[in-house]
Amino acid sequence: MNEPLLELRDLRKHFPLRDALGRARGAVRAVDGVSLAVARGTVLAIVGESGCGKSTLGRLALRLIEPDAGSVRFDGEDLRALSPAALRARRRDMQLIFQDPFASLDPRMTVGAAIAEPLRLHRIVPRGGEASRVAELLERVGLRPESAQRWPHEFSGGQRQRIAIARALASGPRLVIGDEPISALDVSVQAQVVNLLADLIRDLGLTFVLISHDLGVVRHIADRVAVMYLGSIVEEGAAATVFAAPRHPYTRALLAAVPGRGIKAPPIEGDVPSPIAPPAGCRFHTRCPHAEALCREQPPILAGGDHRAACHLQDRLPPAPPLQEAEPGGDRLRRLQAFFQPAGTEA
C-alpha cells in the first residue's frame, strides 16, 4: 500500500491560560493525541461540535501553528523537521480554504492580484504569464476572467469563496484543507459551492480534508469521516459505513440531530465539559446515556480496524437503525441542488 499523503501521529496542542499577572492557570487542551492518515486522492471529513478542536487540527496539519507534541508527515516528510525555507517551498503543495470569504481576501488587493500572489511567491509561471493563469483559474471556479480587475467588496459571499478557492488552487497543491468552506455562505449558494469543490477534487485529483459540522455536506462529498469530541477522535471510518452503522454514541447523537436523517438515538444531555479540565475516563461519559463505571474510570482506545471507535461499549450497544430519508429527494443539500441546478456561474 502506498504511503498516505498526510499522516498525523499523536498530535497535541494545548493553549496555556494565564491570569492578569502572567501566572499559569492551566491550559485549553484543544487537540489531545490525534492520529489520522489521509490517502492520496481521497476526501477526509473531520466533524464535530463547535469547540471540539477540528479547526485547530487543520492548522496543525499545515503547520500554521506549532504542535506541542506529535508529528505531521506530508508525502513521507516530517514537516516539523523542515527549515523555514524548506517549509515555505513545501507550502506550494498544501493550501487552506478559510471559513469566512469576507475576511480571507485582502480588500486592498484586486482579485487578480490576490490570485497571482502565490504564482509570484513560488515562481510558478514565467514573467508576464500571470494574467493568463489567473484568467484560467477564474474560469475554472465559474467566474469571468474580467473579474480579475475588480475588488473583493464588489462580489457576493459565494463569489468571494470561489475567488478564495481559485487562490488556493493557484500553486497547484496536492493537499487542500477546507475549514468550514460553506458555513458562512447563504443557503442558496452552499450547494453550488459544494458541487464546485466536488468537481475540482475529481478533475484535479486533489487530496482534500473537509472540516465541517454539516453532516449533509459530509455525506455528499467525503470518502472517510473522523468524528472529534473534546480534542480527540472518537470514531473514524469510511463515510458510508459511519453513516449507516455508527459505533460511538456521540456519532449516533450527531446523526440523530440532523433533520430528515431518520435515525433515532437518545438525546445528548448536559453541556460540553470544559477542555481545560476534561473528564476522566471516556470524555463523553458525562453526556452518554449508556455510560457505565468503566467509562468513568478508563479512557477507551480508538480500536476496530478500518472502522474505529473509542468506546468501551461499542460491541454491546444495540445496532443503529438503518439510515432513512425523511422525504423523497433526500436531505437539505440534495433539495438545494435540485432547486438551484444547473448551478449558476456567478453565485
Image (cartoon, rainbow, N blue to C red):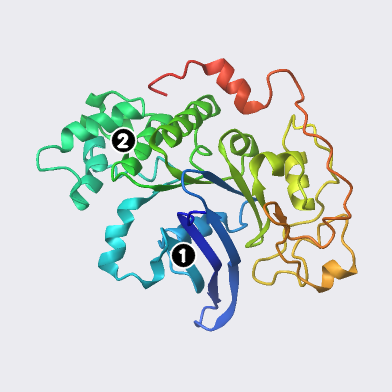
**Secondary structure category for the residue under label 1:** strand
Q: Which quadrant of the structure image shows residue 200?
A: top left
Relative vertical location of residue 152 with respect to residue 237 in this rendering, above or below? above
Q: Which of 55 and 175 is in front in this view?
A: 175
| Disc ID at residue 152 | 2
> What residue appears at the point 54 percent right and 67 percent down from the top-left corner?
9
Q: In this view, does 149 lie to the left or right of 44?
A: left
Relative vertical location of residue 170 with respect to residue 150 in this rendering, above or below? below
Residue with the most extreme left position: 127
Q: In this view, does 75 lie to the left or right of 167?
A: right
**Secondary structure category for the residue under label 2:** helix
Q: Residue type at mark 1?
A: Val
Q: Which of marks 1 and 2 is in front?
A: 1
| Percent x, y of residue 305 | 70, 56
Relative vertical location of residue 209 with respect to residue 3 in this rendering, above or below? above
Read off the residue under disc 1. Answer: 72
Say which quadrant the C terminus sits in. Answer: top left
| Percent x, y of residue 35 | 58, 63
Number of marks in the rendered image: 2
Q: Which quadrant of the structure image shows residue 143?
A: top left
Q: Residue type at mark 2?
A: Pro
Q: Which of 334 and 315 is in front in this view?
A: 315
| Percent x, y of residue 319 | 86, 44
> What residue appears at the point 53 percent right and 24 percent down from the top-left corner?
188
| Disc ID at residue 261 | none
Badge 2: residue crowd in 10 Å (few <14, some 14–19, many ≥20): many
Q: Which of 318 and 343 is in front in this view?
A: 318
Badge 1: residue crowd in 10 Å (few <14, some 14–19, many ≥20): many
The residues tagged by marks 1 and 2 sit, at their Cα atoms, a distance apart of 34 Å
Is label 1 in contact with label 2 (beta carbons under 8 Å)? no
N-term mark: 1 or 2: 1
